[in-house]
Image: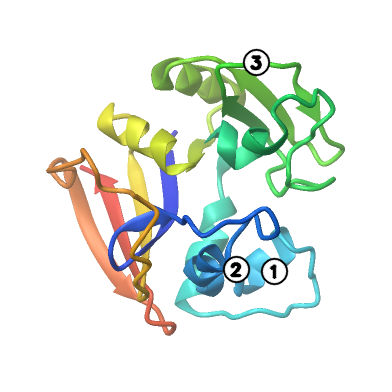
Amino acid sequence: MTVRIDLNISLDGFAATADQTPDDPIGKDWMRLVAAYTGTRTMQARVFGDTSGAGTTGVEEKYASAYFEGVGAEIMGAGMFGLHIYGDDPDWRGWWGDEPPFAMPVFVLTHRPRPSIEFDNGTVFHFVDASPEEALHRATVAAGGADVRVGGGVDVVRQFLAAGLVDRLHVAVVPIVLGQGTRLWEGLRGLEDGYEVTSEVAESGVTHVTFQRR
């Protein structure tokens, strides 16, 4: 079992953007940050439901496909689920639609637990008030021997990295400068110690950097 993280970051280290508005809750900067990733054949099919075969291939597709392989459970923060938007609405089912692209148990870290939400495609959101170690234990049991992915957001990812709980970190460094947002590397000085670090440049110009625990 491997604990995995996959993130896109800008050249200046931002993994979360800050240009969202009420009319545009995602923001243009986020779409710039993930454009190469979401444009792949796998992401078009798994996230956007386009099974026509449209989408890019090559190095980006290799990493996009690997994102979904061998994962049995996911951990995410409340913001990634969408609780920061409608946290007081008990009927809010997240912003992932009626077929969230997980098809597995997902543990949402929140200080305000609520009943689990189950979808027809196998996705089940469990809302837990737990430490990274406690959440990982629950996710590991639920994964049944498969990998556990820590999906985000950035604060959650940093907590797991700082606690030494991550076996593999894949960072796609996108050649754009955001100038604002939330940086990934704050408080993680010397993170590379104990990992083997490799890199690969995709056709898009994105550099894929992988930290694999020795």
Q: What residue is shown at x 73% (from left), y 45% (from top)?
A: 95
Residue bearing the label numbered 2: 38
The furthest residue to the front: 22
Q: What residue is shown at x 21% (from left), y 56% (from top)?
A: 197
- Residue type indicated by callout 3: Pro
- Residue in the foreground of this view, choosing between 104 and 16: 16
Residue 146 in percent (x, y) is at 54, 35
Distance CA(mark 1)–CA(mark 2) = 6 Å
Q: Residues within 10 Å of mark 3 (few under 14, many from 20)?
A: few
- Residue 138 versus residue 196 in the image, above or below: above
Q: What residue is shown at x 50% (from left), y 69% (from top)?
A: 62
Residue 2 visible? The answer is no
Disc 3 secondary structure class: loop
The mark nearer the N terminus, 3 or 2, is 2
Residue bearing the label numbered 3: 113
- Residue type indicated by callout 2: Thr
